[in-house]
Image: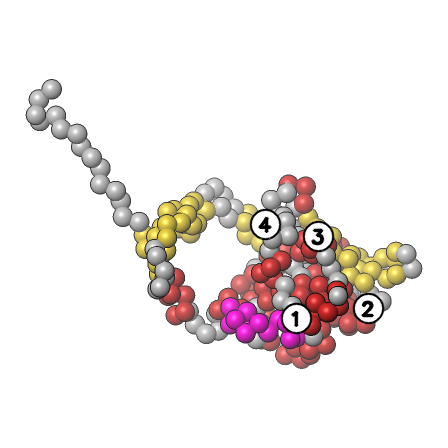
Amino acid sequence: MTQEATLQVKEPVPLERIDLDLRQLRPKNEPWKRARELDSRKTAEFIEPDKVYELLNNLKNPRDKALFCLLYLTASRIEEVVRYRKRLWCKKKVLLIKSGRMPKKAWIQDYKKQKGNFALEPGITKRDIKVIEKENRKIAIVRLRNLKNKQKDENTKIIPITLDNEINNMFFKHIQDYIYTLEDYEELFPFQNRNAEIIISAVGWNPHFIRKVRLTHLVRLYNFSDQELRIYAGWTDTRPSKYYVKLKWEDLLKKL
C-alpha cells in the first residue's frame, strides 16, 4: 500500500440549530401563543361552566356557536371535528438551543420533506350526532375520529352527553339549532383547523384550551377517574392528564 492511499474521513455535517427562545417572537394573536398565555395564568381552574357559556355572546354566527359548544362538550381535538388533512413528514436531527440550558439533540418533523401522499378527510356530519333514550335518560351520542391514539382498535370514539344536565342541555341546544336544517350526510364544519382557530379566537381562546377546561370540569364536577378521562379524551394512556387537568387544593377536600 502506497503513501497516497490514505484513509479519507468524512467530516460530520453540522446540525441545524433551532432557537426555542424565538417562539416568544410570534404575533400576540397567534392561537397557540394565546393558549400558552392562558396556561401560564392557569385560568382553567377558575372558569366555571356558566362562565364558559357566557363566552358564546362573542360569537354571532350559529355555526360558530355550534363549533364552540361541540368542542367544549366533547373535549375533542379540533382535527377530530373539522376537515383533517393527514400528512406524513420525514424527520431530521436538530440541535435545540434555549437560554440557560445545555443544547440538546432531538429528532423533529421536517415540514419541508413530505413522505407519501395525503388526503383530505371530511369533518363531522349530522348523522354522527344522535339523541337517544337510555335508562330513562336523554343522551346525545357524538361519534368522532380519535387522532393520536396508538391503539388500532380505538381510531374512533363515542362521546355521551347527558341532556338532563342543565348546562349540557344549554350548550347542546346551540348544536341542535344549527344542524336542524342540514342533511344527514352534510358536514357541520366544512373547513380545516386553521379557520376553526380563527373562529374560536373571537372569544380570546384556542380550541386546545377549550379541551383543557372541559377535562378539568369532568374531574371537578363529575368526579371522573383517570381511566374514565382517558376514554373521554381519547388518550392511549392516562399520562396526559397531568398536563390537561387543573385542580385547586379545595378540590381535594371532596375526596377526604
On the image, the x and y values in percent for residue 173 come to 78, 70
Whether residue 176 is visible to the viewer of this picture, yes or no, is yes
Number of residues whose C-alpha sits closer than 10 Å to that of mark 3, classed few (under 14), some (14–19) or many (20 or more) = few
> Which residue: 22% across, 37% down?
10
Assign the C terminus to one quadrant of the image. bottom right
Q: Is residue 254 found left or right of 244 in the rendered image?
A: right
Marks 2 & 3, CB-CB < 8 Å contact: no
Relative vertical location of residue 69 with respect to residue 186 in this rendering, above or below: below
Identify the residue under disc 4. 148
Q: Earlier in the sequence, mark 2 or mark 1?
A: 2
Q: Which residues are magenta?
A: 36-47
Q: Nearer the viewer, residue 46 or 35?
A: 46
Looking at the rendered structure, the kind of residue marked 4 is: Lys
- Tag on residue 165? 2
Q: Is residue 164 found left or right of 120 in the rendered image?
A: right
Q: Earlier in the sequence, mark 4 or mark 1?
A: 4
> Which residue: 73% across, 69% down?
253
